[in-house]
Image: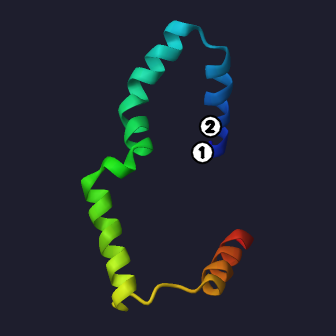
Amino acid sequence: MTTAAIRQKLYDYIRVADDKTVKAIYTIVAEDANEANEWWQDKKMLDKLDKIDADLESGADEGVSWEAAKKKLQERAKK
């Protein structure tokens, strides 16, 4: 089953599930959901972003042009 199909099944299930079931599901995924929504409080994530930014600014990382990124994404979409 694809991830998209699983998402749809979960969405459909949660829409009609009773309150007790929704709260139980939320308890299971709450920590991950909060981490994903609060990335700006993650010191490791912020340090990594600072390093990426510094490397781009200094030229240590040349980055990728928009055209090159767009081309690669279009190639992936064709597969």
For mark 1, what is the residue?
3
Q: Residue at x 44, y 42 (%)?
A: 37
Q: Residue at x 61, y 13 (%)?
A: 17
Residue 6 x %, y %: 61, 37
**Above or below 11: residue 63:** below
**Above or below 58: residue 2:** above
- In the image, what residue type sits under mark 1? Thr
Q: Residue at x 50, y 7 (%)?
A: 20
Image-quadrant location for residue 27: top left
- In the image, what residue type sits under mark 2? Arg
19 and 45: which one is in front?
A: 45
Circles 2, 1 touching at the beta carbon (< 8 Å)? yes
Going by the image, does 33 lie left or right of 5? left
**Above or below 47: residue 73:** below
Going by the image, does 66 lie left or right of 34? right
Q: Label 1's element?
A: helix
Q: Quadrant of the N terminus?
A: top right
Near mark 2 (Cα within 10 A), the count class, few <14, some 14-19 or many ≥20, is few
Q: CA distance from mark 2 to mark 1?
A: 6 Å
Near mark 1 (Cα within 10 A), the count class, few <14, some 14-19 or many ≥20, is few
Residue 12 x %, y %: 68, 25
Q: Find residue 7 and name its label.
A: 2
